[in-house]
């Protein structure tokens, strides 16, 4: 755990830019302080003590050298300069004011400018170094970004999520290292094999963050993302830092050159010649620079500091140009934090993070939490688990159309781990959930039989795939393109139903290739909603056991259906919106076919209907939503047909031969243009459902009421004006639609239809009220 004391540094007042100073900048800062102290100390000496002390000399100027000045030095100094010499004193007869005058005059005229202004130069140069160091912090184009970055970094430290995420990662790394002690001799191969399982994250064992802390962490993730996008647009910070460093290097060389040249000008003895004979009586003087000995030591010390400072600047330039700062990968941070998904970053963002890493690697580790997609996904997972409790999920359980207990989740940022606590779950429907990975907890759903993935790309680890391989019965996948269908779907050996929806890319639409279906040994139902120009060749992989094939083509014309002939076990075939203009001949080879649906095509003629006599097991024929103008007489050959759907066509008449389809139980000819019905319909003694709505019928044949097994009779929205009393003979009638006609009254014989109740009679209220009271009472019982 990271101590709480580390968080206090952001609450205490401190320089905001300290975080962006690596070790060489910190060292340079200390050097500038030392150089400034040298300059201030020298300036203090200049003010508090005499600067120079001069004595007159009577030697001729042409013979003047430092030898006469040696007589004025202490014994030890004279020995150092030239050995012992016997001297005798001179009486000058000068007062104190004259000496002060000479001292000031010789200081201004004879003393070298470097020895005179050395401490002031040190102060000025040091201040320039300090300004250069802070130049990129205060530049208008960089200061706002730096302040924003530092504030975000402080919030990252204050967030409890950083400690939580780092502690989890360190715990996982410790467990992994402990587990690997016994397997160290097995080589690197097992490490590589175990790597893919890292995408599966176990639910954290620590206590959940409260709702407020979770929201703050998520908001901080968004801030880091927005700041990163903004800062990575340019490299102004990187450029300004380079300019600042180059400026310091140039300044370093300039100071070093002239300091080495002029440092020897700081001498202890100074010869001075000024014409003061009228004032003092002397022209030549021998002067002592009182601070020369100390200044020379300070100068060499100052030069040493400048050299060290220059070396740091040169190293900074090497670091800037030698390291790939603009594409820094943070390998060290990845390895130490265990968060291997930290993305490569560029430009100013990479530069600032690299500076932080040089200053203190702990800072970069904690900030890396908010760069890690794994960390963000863990936070989302915690929030999901906190929001979607098992009790809340159980309230969403419903029975689907297949009677299975289903849980439907839509547009969530992930899949809550609490889902896998619902052991009674039989069907899981996931819609618009991106980047989904099933965790090992999937094995707890022992009753799971159906999975629907609607625009939810899903990864399935090998362990979970082995669990689902023989268990899943139904899979529904909907995606933008069929090549996005997860490959693990095609390896489910126990799968019985596969429903795929998506488009083939334009370059693959004509070929219409799917992954191999050979592993689907139990597949019985295959539904494909796409834009294929042909039946995919891989469908023949399941030709021996496929019982239902549904092809929804959304209007794209299917050019060839020859591969259908191989589906010898096919019982149901749906070719919906396939652009067919005639009934495909390949259909007539399907001897086991029981149901055929050709909805929403462009059929105009169905003369081929005669060939259906070869499909002896055909009981349901759906030709609805086409442009069929007539039904040929060959329809009489379909003796075994039980259901015939011809709604939403352009029929104006029905052939009399239709009455010879003695097995017909359902006939739907609604939404056509029929003006009359053939009396032969009365021969359909097994007819139970007859739909005649939305036509132009003006009368019903008397023979129609011989169909005594009719349970549903739909006559709505025609031109009928009179209902025959023979309707009372339809004792099995339970649903009668009469709305939208021209009825004057309803026959009271409706009371003889024992199965007809008010709920099953669809008619205008005024006509219903016109029925005798006893008939209405009987219907309302």
Image (cartoon, rainbow, N blue to C red):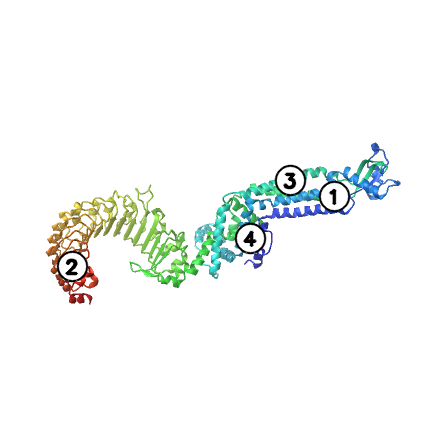
Q: Which secondary structure, mark 4?
A: helix
Lower sequence index among marks 3 and 1:
3
Asked if disc 1 and disc 4 are in contact, CB closer than 8 Å, the reply is no
Nearest to N terminus: mark 3 or mark 4: 3
Where is residue 172 drawn, in percent x and y?
Answer: 49, 56
Give the Cα separation between the discs numbered 1 and 2: 124 Å
Image height check: is 175 above or below 310?
Answer: below
C-alpha separation, residue under disc 3 versus residue under disc 4: 34 Å
Mark 1 lies on residue: 295
Q: Residues within 10 Å of mark 1 (few under 14, many from 20)?
A: many
The correct choice, above or below, for 393 with respect to 454 in the image is: below
Q: Nearer the viewer, residue 53 or 274?
A: 274
Q: Position of residue 714 (x, y in %)?
A: 18, 56
Q: Report which quarter residue 84 is drawn in.
A: top right
Q: Disc 4 designates what residue?
A: 362
The answer for how far apart the CA atoms under marks 3 and 2 are is: 106 Å
Residue 493 visible in the current orientation: no
The residue tagged 3 is 251
Q: CA distance from mark 1 to mark 4?
A: 44 Å
324 to the left or right of 628: right
In contact (CB < 8 Å): disc 3 and disc 2: no
Residue 384 occupies which quadrant of the picture?
bottom left
Determine which residue is flagged by label 2. Answer: 710
């Amino acid at each position: 755990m990271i101590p709480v004391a580390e968080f206090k540094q952001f609450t205490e007042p401190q320089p905001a830019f300290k975080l962006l100073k690596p070790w060489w900048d910190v060292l340079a800062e200390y050097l500038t302080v030392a150089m400034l102290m040298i300059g201030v100390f020298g300036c203090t000496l200049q003010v508090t003590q005499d600067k120079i002390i001069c004595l007159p000399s009577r030697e001729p100027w042409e013979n003047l050298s430092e030898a006469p000045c040696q007589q004025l030095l202490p014994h030890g100094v004279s020995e150092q300069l030239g050995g012992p010499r016997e001297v005798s004193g001179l009486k000058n007869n000068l007062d104190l004011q004259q000496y002060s005058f000479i001292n000031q005059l010789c200081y201004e005229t004879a003393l070298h400018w470097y020895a005179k202004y050395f401490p002031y130069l040190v102060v000025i140069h040091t201040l320039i170094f300090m300004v250069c160091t802070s130049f990129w912090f205060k530049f208008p184009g960089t200061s706002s970004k730096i302040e924003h970055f530092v504030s975000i970094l402080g919030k990252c430290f204050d967030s409890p999520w950083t400690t939580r995420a780092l502690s989890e990662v360190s715990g996982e790394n410790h467990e992994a290292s402990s587990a690997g002690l016994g397997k160290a001799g097995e080589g690197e191969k097992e490490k590589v094999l175990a790597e893919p399982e890292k995408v599966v994250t176990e639910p954290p064992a620590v206590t959940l963050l409260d709702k407020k802390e979770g929201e703050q962490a998520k908001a901080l993730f968004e801030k880091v993302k927005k700041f990163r996008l903004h800062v990575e647009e340019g490299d102004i910070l990187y450029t300004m830092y380079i300019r600042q460093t180059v400026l310091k290097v140039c300044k370093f060389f300039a100071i070093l050159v002239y300091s080495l040249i002029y440092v020897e000008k700081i001498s202890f003895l100074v010869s001075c010649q000024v014409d003061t004979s009228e004032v003092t009586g002397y022209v030549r003087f021998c002067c002592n620079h009182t601070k020369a000995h100390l200044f020379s030591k300070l100068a060499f010390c100052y030069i040493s500091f400048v050299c060290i400072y220059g070396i740091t600047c040169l190293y900074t330039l090497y670091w800037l140009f030698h390291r790939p700062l603009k594409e820094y990968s943070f390998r060290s941070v990845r390895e130490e934090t265990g968060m291997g998904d930290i993305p490569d970053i560029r430009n100013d963002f990479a530069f600032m993070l690299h500076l932080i890493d040089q200053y203190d690697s702990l800072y970069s580790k904690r900030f890396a939490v908010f760069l890690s997609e794994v960390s963000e996904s863990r936070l989302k997972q915690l929030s999901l688990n906190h929001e979607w409790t098992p009790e809340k999920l159980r309230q969403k359980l419903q029975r689907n159309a297949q009677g299975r207990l289903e849980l439907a989740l839509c547009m969530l940022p992930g899949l809550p781990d609490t889902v896998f606590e619902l052991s009674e779950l039989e069907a899981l429907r996931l819609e618009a959930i991106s980047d989904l990975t099933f965790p090992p907890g999937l094995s707890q759903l022992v009753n799971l039989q159906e999975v629907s993935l609607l625009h939810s790309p899903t990864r399935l680890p090998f362990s979970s795939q082995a669990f689902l391989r023989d268990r899943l019965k139904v899979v529904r996948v909907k995606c933008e393109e069929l090549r996005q269908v997860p490959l693990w779907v095609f390896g489910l050996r126990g799968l019985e139903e596969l429903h795929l929806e998506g488009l083939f890319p334009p370059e693959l639409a004509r070929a219409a290739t799917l992954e191999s279906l050979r592993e689907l040994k139990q597949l019985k139902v295959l539904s494909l909603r796409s834009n294929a120009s042909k039946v995919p060749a891989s469908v023949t992989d399941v030709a021996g056991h496929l019982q239902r094939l549904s092809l929804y083509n959304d209007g794209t014309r299917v050019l060839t259906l020859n591969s259908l002939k191989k589906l010898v076990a096919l019982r149901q075939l749906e070719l919906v919106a396939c652009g067919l203009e005639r009934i495909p001949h390949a259909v007539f080879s399907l001897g086991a076919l029981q149901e055929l649906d050709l909805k929403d095509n462009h059929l105009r003629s169905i003369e081929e209907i005669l060939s259906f006599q070869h499909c002896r097991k055909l009981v349901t024929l759906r030709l609805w939503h086409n442009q069929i103008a007539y039904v040929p007489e060959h329809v009489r050959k379909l003796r075994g047909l039980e259901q015939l759907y011809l709604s939403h066509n352009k029929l104006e008449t029905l052939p009399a031969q239709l009455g010879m389809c003695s097995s017909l139980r359902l006939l739907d000819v609604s939404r056509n243009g029929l003006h009359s019905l053939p009396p032969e319909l009365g021969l359909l003694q097994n007819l139970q459902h007859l739909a005649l709505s939305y036509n132009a019928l003006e009368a019903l044949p008397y023979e129609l009421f011989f169909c005594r097994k009719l349970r549903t009779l739909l006559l709505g929205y025609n031109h009928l004006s009179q209902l025959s009393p023979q309707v009372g003979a339809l004792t099995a009638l339970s649903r009668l639609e009469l709305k939208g006609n021209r009825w004057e009254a309803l026959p009271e014989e409706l009371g003889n239809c024992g199965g007809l109740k008010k709920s099953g009679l669809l008619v205008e209220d005024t006509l219903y009220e016109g029925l005798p009271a006893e008939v209405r009472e009987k219907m309302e019982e």
